[in-house]
Amino acid sequence: MKKLFVLCVFLFCSSASAGEPLPDLKIEKLEEGVYVHTSFEQVNGWGVVSKNGLVVLVNTDAYLIDTPFTAKDTEKLVNWLVEHGYKIKGTISSHFHSDSTGGIEWLNSQSIPTYASELTNELLKKDGKAQAKHSFGGISYWLVKNKIEVFYPGPGHTQDNVVVWLPEKKILFGGCFVKPHGLGNLGDANLKAWPKSAKILMSRYGHAKLVVASHSENGDASLLKRTWEQAVKGLKEDKKMPLPSS
């Protein structure tokens, strides 16, 4: 696997709720025309959490796959791209949690096109959060024809989680659906459906050259099988849980 090259580290530090500075926003070159942006946030019960998203370049147009955690880091990411001569043509959020959507309100204020599935927008509205300006239905949607495909494998980490496929690069952004080391936050998970959804993802993108996950290291398509194994394990453990007393 190609070693990531750290291209830019911003000097600004946000402050965590405990008063400790968070790590700086990072932008790393994955390969030609594809970058990983990594932001950090203090999350109750989990400590400082890192979250990966992508930037995909199509000539001089830039597309964000997930926003950073915050509006401030989203603005920094956009400013860096603009300073390097790129125009932000659109953003897609892979699910309704803030680690994928935290910058939507700021992007909307800048008239930068924001996209999310209809279900993601419904969940954002239910939570009283800013929604993407554009939405789509169905299991597959081309953000950029033949270059950036959005696919819905079914429920897993959340009811609305989607993945993003770059066919020319054979790179899959698995987002928070891909969990090779453990399922993590199960607050909005669908443990019953996750194994089947993971099987669908394995069948469709088992030929991926590189898989980018939100909260773990990048790897090859074996991350998909390991996610399926974790989902099966999680379902078995859930079935063993005693029923609450009446």
Image: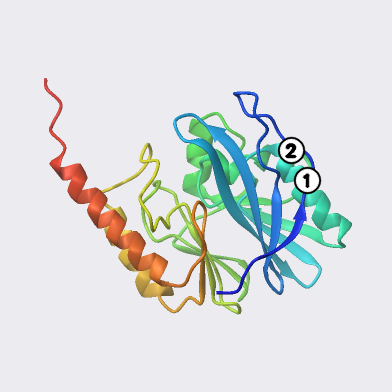
| Label disc, if present, on residue 72 of the rendered structure | 2
In the structure shown, which secondary structural element does the residue marked by tag 2 occupy? helix
Residue 91: percent from left, percent from top:
66, 54
Asked if one can make out residue 169 in the rendered structure from this viewpoint, the answer is yes
Q: Quadrant of the C terminus?
A: top left
Marks 2 and 1: in contact by CB < 8 Å?
yes
Amino acid type, label 1:
Lys
Relative to 223, is 216 on the left or the right? right
Amino acid type, label 2:
Lys
Give the CA separation, mark 1 to mark 2.
Answer: 6 Å
Residue 198: percent from left, percent from top:
34, 62
Q: Is residue 104 above or below residue 139?
A: above
Task: Say how the picture is coloured.
Answer: rainbow
Residue 131: percent from left, percent from top:
60, 40
| Label disc, if present, on residue 76 of the rendered structure | 1
Q: Residue at x 55, y 29 (%)?
A: 128
